[in-house]
Amino acid sequence: MESIRTVSKERTERLAWLSKIALTREEVEKFTDQLNRILEFAKALDSPEVEGAEPTFHVLDLANTFREDLEEGGLKREEALSTAPKVKDGFIVAPKIV
């Protein structure tokens, strides 16, 4: 894959064609300029100033935020079945799906 240092008018026209977007000559000029400015901004990310910065794995200073696992009682069968629209022999009856 080739490295993109600048975007040419031809590349902008090719991108527009691939995107199935019809561009006028003025729009090609405008978008070519905008794409080149975006690439210039992205170049600043290639060499960030990191001298003196501590390495980090997470932006927040959090450590093991899990709660203790406690056993709790669940619903009794009668409570669980009390909201079902139809019950037969202690089970919820659902419509047959084929």
Image (cartoon, rainbow, N blue to C red):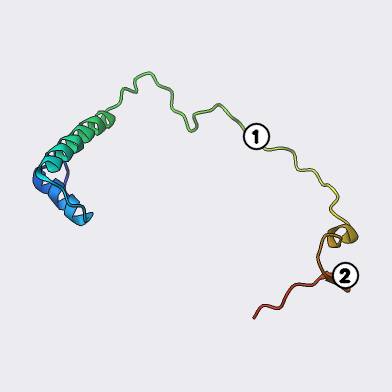
Residue 34 placement, left or right of 59: left
Mark drawn on residue 90: 2
Depicted 2 relative to depicted 87: above or below: above
Q: Quadrant of residue 31?
A: top left
Residues under labels 2 and 1: Cα distance? 40 Å
Residue plotted at (74% across, 39% down)? 68
Q: Could you say where residue 40 lies in the image, as x and y percent from the top left?
A: 20, 31
Residue plotted at (64% across, 81% down)? 98
- Check disc 1: other Cα within 10 Å, few if <14, some if 14-19, many if 20+: few
Residue plotted at (17% across, 55% down)? 17
Q: Could you say where residue 93 lies in the image, as x and y percent from the top left?
A: 79, 72
| Res 75 seen here | yes
Q: Which residue is mark 1?
A: 65
The one of 75 and 63 positioned closer to us in this rendering: 75
Q: How many marks?
A: 2
| Res 1 seen here | no
Mark drawn on residue 32: none
Tell me the kind of residue under disc 2.
Gly
